[in-house]
Image (cartoon, rainbow, N blue to C red):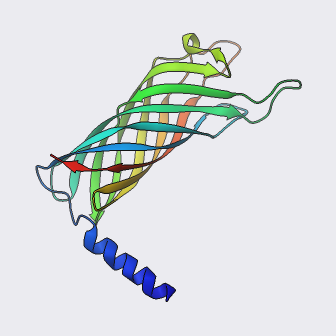
Amino acid sequence: MKKLLVVAAILLGAVTANAQNEVGQISIAPTIGLNYAKITMDKQEFAPFFEVGANAEYGMTEKLGISAGVFYSLQGSKDKEAAPGYKKEKTKTSYINVPILANYYVWNGLAVKAGVQPGFLLSAKYGSTDVKKDAKKFDLGIPVGVSYEISNFVVDLRYVFGLTKTAKESDHQKAGKNQVIQLTAGYKFKL
């Protein structure tokens, strides 16, 4: 019975998935999702955050689409350990990220993607302390990932490799780079 259900689900997915990208088609997809982020510094580890925004995509060919998005993204990291007498703190940064991606459709609704992602800092806190004055205002990353679309619902998994340091360096601190794993879901509207 389980095998029959798995086969039925696969067939249903194949029937309802979009076979290919439509040439000349523009679509918009509002999305919401989770970020699992870390700043690459000693004694820091991944922490959960969220993001919300929208992507627009243009179908260049049946297999290739170009997309651009605008996202409000919370990122940062948390302390691995606390100094004696202190608690572990989170570094929380918020950005407006603008991912620009090439989406290559390899199979019914399945796309691989890569591109660039400029980010613009809105706020930065360590615990309850505002540290925006010590943070760089611009961030650049390379997002790579996969997405799957079925009946206009899109699930997207990306890893963003940070290229720029997040803080202005000083003698007493080393600045790290953003690393973000993003899992989002959205609904695609064709224009």
Using the rendered view, name the quadrant where residue 15 is placed. bottom left
Position of 188 with respect to 26 (left or right) is right
Position of 110 with respect to 165 (left or right) is left
- Expressed as whole percent of the image width and height from the top left, the position of residue 41 reads 66, 31
* Furthest residue in direction left, as rendered: 24
* Furthest residue in direction top, as rendered: 133
Using the rendered view, name the quadrant where residue 32 is placed. top left
Q: Is residue 166 above or below residue 105?
A: above
- Expressed as whole percent of the image width and height from the top left, the position of residue 166 reads 54, 23
* Furthest residue in direction right, as rendered: 84
Q: How many numbered circles does the render carry?
A: 0
Please name whichever residue, 40 or 57, is drawn nearer the observer in this view of the structure. Answer: 57
- Expressed as whole percent of the image width and height from the top left, the position of residue 185 reads 40, 50
Please name whichever residue, 7 or 37, is drawn nearer the observer in this view of the structure. Answer: 7
- Expressed as whole percent of the image width and height from the top left, the position of residue 8 reads 37, 81
Please name whichever residue, 104 or 56, is drawn nearer the observer in this view of the structure. Answer: 56
- Tell me what residue is drawn at x 27 percent, y 50 percent: 188
- Tell me what residue is drawn at x 12 percent, y 54 percent: 23
Q: Is residue 127 above or below residue 13?
A: above
Q: Is residue 187 above or below residue 138?
A: below
- Tell me what residue is drawn at x 21 percent, y 53 percent: 64
Position of 169 with respect to 184 (left or right) is right
